[in-house]
Image: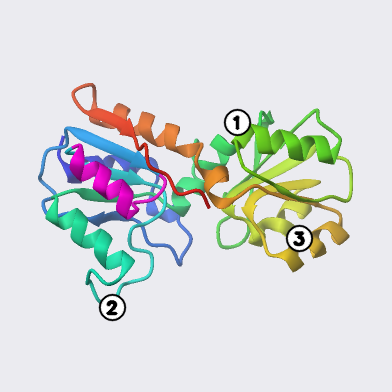
Amino acid sequence: MHVQEFSDALDALYPKILSCPWDNDGLMCCTDPAAQIKKVLVALDATCKVLEEAAARQFDLVLTHHPLLFKGPKTIVPSTATGTRIIAAVQSNIAVLSLHTRLDAGEGGVNDCLAAALGLDGPLKVFGDSESPTLGRIGATDISDGNVFAAHVKEALQAPAVCAYLCRPVRNVAVCGGSGGDLVFPALAAGADTLVTGECGYNLCLDGADSGINIITAGHFHTEQPVCRRLAQLAQDIAGADTRIISSDTGVLL
């Protein structure tokens, strides 16, 4: 399978229509769309260390959740982080492909994986806002004590710490990996008593708790990292047994 075929197959599973309007993802960097894929490296981010790993281990493609190019760079020079990454990918003939908010919103994506990691009972309810109506998920838990549930989130996601803004017992838990502050009040309106997300502004957390919804933040990386296993399986299913799919040994803990 070549790079463009692989990209088209992912687009079919997670179409651009699921993306937030401000998002940028897809095939981020590629010197030859017709190049054959034999080895794919999966990571949350295409950091310099991930690209160094890909080059050293001779991978053809890096598949990530976060886009390599989010806001258009004005220059591509080694004095900037983005420029260094692009130059490294091009020099090593490594394609970089990312699925961002469409993977958050789509079935089996970031938030389904996060709900599964937390052991939430289904069927999961889909919710969101006007910009992305299928972004979040709501499931149930039997852990009613907020402090106990916060400790469960920390352990389940292997997060070094969590912040919990608690106001009521826990039962119906909304999840949004990464930066989920925009879904605080949509989650409350959808019937959730608790929102688990990666990061949320301090004042918004206070406002949420005063309005009747618990908010637990566990870190951007730790709430989205569970999707990497899903990405690896998707890549294997698409590319077939002849292609080797590996999850990166390198991570950035944010």
Tell which residue pokes out farthest to the bottom in this image. Answer: 74
Callout 2: 10 Å neighbours few (<14), some, many (20+)? few
At label 1, which amino acid type do we have?
Ala
Precedes in sequence: disc 3 or disc 1: 1
Look at the magenta stretch and give its main secondary structure: helix
Q: Is residue 72 above or below residue 189?
A: below
Quarter location, residue 25: bottom left
Which three-letter amino acid code belongs to the residue tagged 3?
Answer: Cys
Q: Position of residue 229 (x, y in %)?
A: 43, 32
Q: Which mark is residue 205?
A: 3
Does the rendering let one see residue 83? yes
Q: Is residue 159 left or right of residue 60?
A: right
Q: Which residue is mark 1?
A: 116
Residue 140: quarter of image: top right
Gap in angstroms between the C-alphas marked 2 and 1: 40 Å
Residue lying at 69% horizontally and 37% vertically, measured from the top left: 153
> In this picture, which residue range is highlighted in magenta?
44-57
Q: Residue at x 88, y 51 (%)?
A: 167
Q: Please state if 78 lies on the left or on the right of 123 as rendered.
A: left
* Mark 1 Cα-neighbour bin, 10 Å: few <14, some 14–19, many ≥20: some
Residue 77 position in % (x across, y down): 22, 72
User: Which residue is under mark 2?
Assistant: 74
State the separation of the CA atoms marked 3 and 1. 24 Å
In contact (CB < 8 Å): disc 2 and disc 1: no
Describe the element under mark 2 as helix, strand or loop. loop
- Verify whether residue 38 appears in magenta: no
Asked if the magenta segment contains residue 51, the reply would be yes
Q: Position of residue 63 (x, y in %)?
A: 32, 44
